[in-house]
Image: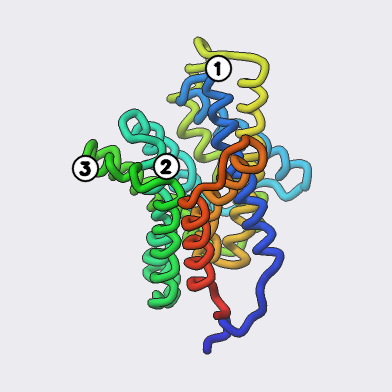
């Protein structure tokens, strides 16, 4: 039994994952509200710009500043591209033709990409238990969302590959966060988001000249940028550095579980057999894949 398997549960990291599940799981509803007043390109641009502003302000107020070496800027730049600029662009384009439920299933294959990248880049053991656990979790996600969503497979192949590319980008960036040289979370996250914003804003910033709304849409957009993107990316960076990308990958499967809970508790949705079976499979998969077993 290796050292990682002998350590007790890291409750701080578990709490961080729980906070990310709630934060990112709530982003879908906020995005729907934001899209009532803004187009997709404007929403992506605003999220990137607001996140960069909030994180750079945090770096300034905490007197930590931005990274001071070229090496750190290169790492942060690549992470910014692979965690925000590229996946947001791929997903926005893909969802022009791919149903959102099918896109969710394809993107949630991210943990399997994490296992591959973690093995290649970090040397993390690719154990049968971990692979089996994530496959069971992915099966639970398909049951939870509904197998009917897979009926679109084979349609627009390029768009579906873009969804898988999005999952691969998120997985790759998580592994890079763990691999990069030591740096404080706030400066690193601020630099990453600033890089992504500088790439996205020239293409999407002009959308605000013709698309601008007030009220709920604007409020949702601000929350998406500041909390769901800025604060969440900071917490994601901290969690990956502390517990590793494989541990962090569990977020992909738990977000739909949270969404189902919200639907039952607050929206009056019913508890269906697929909800129960899907939840059971997801939790079982995570229990199988977890360290310390």
Determine whether the residue tagged by mark 1 lies in a helix, strand or loop.
loop
Given contact means CB atoms under 8 Å apart, are the residues at marks 1 and 2 in contact? no
List the residue tagged with mark 2. Answer: 87
Residue at horizontal 57 percent and vertical 38 percent from the top: 269
Residue 31 is situated, as x and y percent measured from the top left of the image, at 55, 30
Residue 141 position (above or below residue 98)? below
How many residues crowd around disc 2 within 10 Å: few (fewer than 14), some, or many (20 or more)?
A: many
List the residue tagged with mark 1. Answer: 37
List the residue tagged with mark 3. Answer: 154
Residue 71 visible in this rendered orientation of the protein: no
Residue 48 position (above or below residue 138)? above
Determine whether the residue tagged by mark 3 lies in a helix, strand or loop.
loop
Residue at horizontal 57 percent and vertical 79 percent from the top: 292
Give the side of residue 59 with respect to residue 175, left or right: right
Residue 171 is situated, as x and y percent measured from the top left of the image, at 44, 56
Marks 2 and 3 sit apart, C-alpha to C-alpha, by: 21 Å
């Amino acid at each position: 039994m290796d050292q990682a398997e002998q350590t007790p549960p890291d409750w701080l990291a578990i709490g961080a994952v729980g906070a990310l599940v709630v934060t990112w799981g709530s982003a879908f509803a906020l995005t729907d509200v934001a899209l009532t007043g803004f187009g997709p390109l404007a929403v992506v641009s605003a999220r990137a710009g607001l996140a960069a502003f909030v994180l750079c302000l945090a770096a300034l107020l905490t007197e930590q500043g931005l990274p001071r070496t070229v090496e750190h800027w290169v790492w942060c730049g690549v992470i910014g591209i692979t965690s925000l600029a590229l996946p947001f662009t791929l997903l926005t384009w893909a969802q022009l033709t791919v149903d959102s439920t099918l896109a969710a299933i394809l993107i949630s294959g991210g943990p399997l990409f994490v296992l591959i990248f973690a093995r290649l880049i970090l040397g993390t053991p690719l154990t049968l238990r971990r692979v089996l656990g994530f496959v069971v979790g992915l099966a639970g996600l398909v049951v939870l969302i509904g197998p009917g969503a897979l009926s679109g497979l084979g349609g627009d192949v390029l768009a579906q590959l873009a969804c898988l590319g999005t999952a691969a980008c998120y997985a790759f960036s998580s592994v890079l966060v763990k691999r990069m040289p030591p740096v404080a979370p706030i400066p690193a996250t601020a630099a990453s988001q600033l890089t992504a914003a500088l790439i996205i804003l020239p293409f999407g910033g002009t959308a605000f000249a013709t698309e601008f709304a007030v009220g709920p849409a604007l409020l949702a957009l601000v929350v998406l940028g500041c909390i769901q993107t800025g604060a969440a990316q900071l917490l994601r960076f901290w969690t990956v550095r502390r517990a590793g990308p494989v541990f962090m990958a569990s977020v992909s499967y738990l977000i739909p579980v949270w969404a189902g809970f919200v639907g039952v508790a607050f929206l009056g949705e019913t508890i269906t057999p697929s909800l129960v079976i899907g939840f059971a499979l997801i939790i079982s998969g995570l229990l199988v894949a977890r360290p310390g077993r």
